[in-house]
């Protein structure tokens, strides 16, 4: 148990740095959004109502991944804990989840049609390498089991990020840095989409499929995780 505790301390130490970066990049407002990291069967998640820009690793609420019950923590977990747990249960390769309500994500989610595989046009090689594809889920209330089930289902297919209609985005990674970098690339793509009113020209189908295949191959080989 102490080894797991040490690993949790290591995994949660960068929380302060990446939560500040999320705020600076307009991924979250003061009290919007949430983050979590996982070590083994323990998930450490931001408390409900927390201001991410002020959060440290020590503030995270630790819960059992299978039961959702708190482990030696006083705070209340984010109300969006159910979808964080749903992702970890589906994806043993994922050890960090970040979620924000960026205005670009919210607006883009209302301009596109829900699609469980990919709803978004690709504009750049960087997006295809990092995000690869972007499912869009139809609206469900925050914190609902319906949302958690839908999110778990779409991440089970291997997605690295998902758009939630009239809500925001979720990005995942092998650690917080990886999840943040994916979200950062995603937010630039969403910004390009919204600022062009959806009229920017995507890359060709040939380029999209070739670069996606390359990105999928890199994931299989453990590169660019
Ligand atoms: Zn939310």
Image (cartoon, helix red, strand yellow):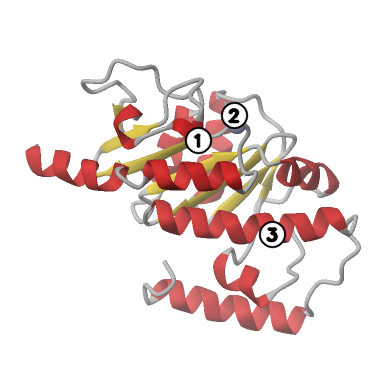
Q: Which residue is mark 2?
A: 30
Q: Are marks 1 and 2 in contact (CB under 8 Å)?
A: yes
Comparing marks 3 and 1, which lies closer to the viewer? 1
Nearer to us in this view, 100 or 58: 58
Q: Residues within 10 Å of mark 3 (few under 14, many from 20)?
A: some
Q: CA distance from mark 2 to mark 3?
A: 21 Å
Is 151 drawn above or below residue 184 in the view shown? above
Q: Residue under label 1, please give it.
A: 53
For ligand 1, which image quadrant applies? Answer: top right
**Mark-to-mark CA distance, 1 and 2:** 7 Å
Residue 216 drawn above or below residue 101: below
Q: Residue at x 46, y 29 (%)?
A: 82
Residue ID at (40%, 47%): 96
Q: Is residue 119 visible?
A: no
User: Is there CB contact under 8 Å for labels 3 and 1?
Assistant: no
Mark sitting earlier along the chain (2/3): 2
- Label 2 vs label 3, nearer the camera: 2
Residue at (40% x, 41% y) in the render = 16
**Residue at label 3?**
188
Residue with the most extreme left position:
2
Q: Position of residue 225 (x, y in %)?
A: 41, 66
Horizontal side, residue 130 vs residue 38: left or right: right
Q: Tag 3, which secondary structure?
A: helix
**Which label was assigned to residue 27?**
none
């Amino acid at each position: 148990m102490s080894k797991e505790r040490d690993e949790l301390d290591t995994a949660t130490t960068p929380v302060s740095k990446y939560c500040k970066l999320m705020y600076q990049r307009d991924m979250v407002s003061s009290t919007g959004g949430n983050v979590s990291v996982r070590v083994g069967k323990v998930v450490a998640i931001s408390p409900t109502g927390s201001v991410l820009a002020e959060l440290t690793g020590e503030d995270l609420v630790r819960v059992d991944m299978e039961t959702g019950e708190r482990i030696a923590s006083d705070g209340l977990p984010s109300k969006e804990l159910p979808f964080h747990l749903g992702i970890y249960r589906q994806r043993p390769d994922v050890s960090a989840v970040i979620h924000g309500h960026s205005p670009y994500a919210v607006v883009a989610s209302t301009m596109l049609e829900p699609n469980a595989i990919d709803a978004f046009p690709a504009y750049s090689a960087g997006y295809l390498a990092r995000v690869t594809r972007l499912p869009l889920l139809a609206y469900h209330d925050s914190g609902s089991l319906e949302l958690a089930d839908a999110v778990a289902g779409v991440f089970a297919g291997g997605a690295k990020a998902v758009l939630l209609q009239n809500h925001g985005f979720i990005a995942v990674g092998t650690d917080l840095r990886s999840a943040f970098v994916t979200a950062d690339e995603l937010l630039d793509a969403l910004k390009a989409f919204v600022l062009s009113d959806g009229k920017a020209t995507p890359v060709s189908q040939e380029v999209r499929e070739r670069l996606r295949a390359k990105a999928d191959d890199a994931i299989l080989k453990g590169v660019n995780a």
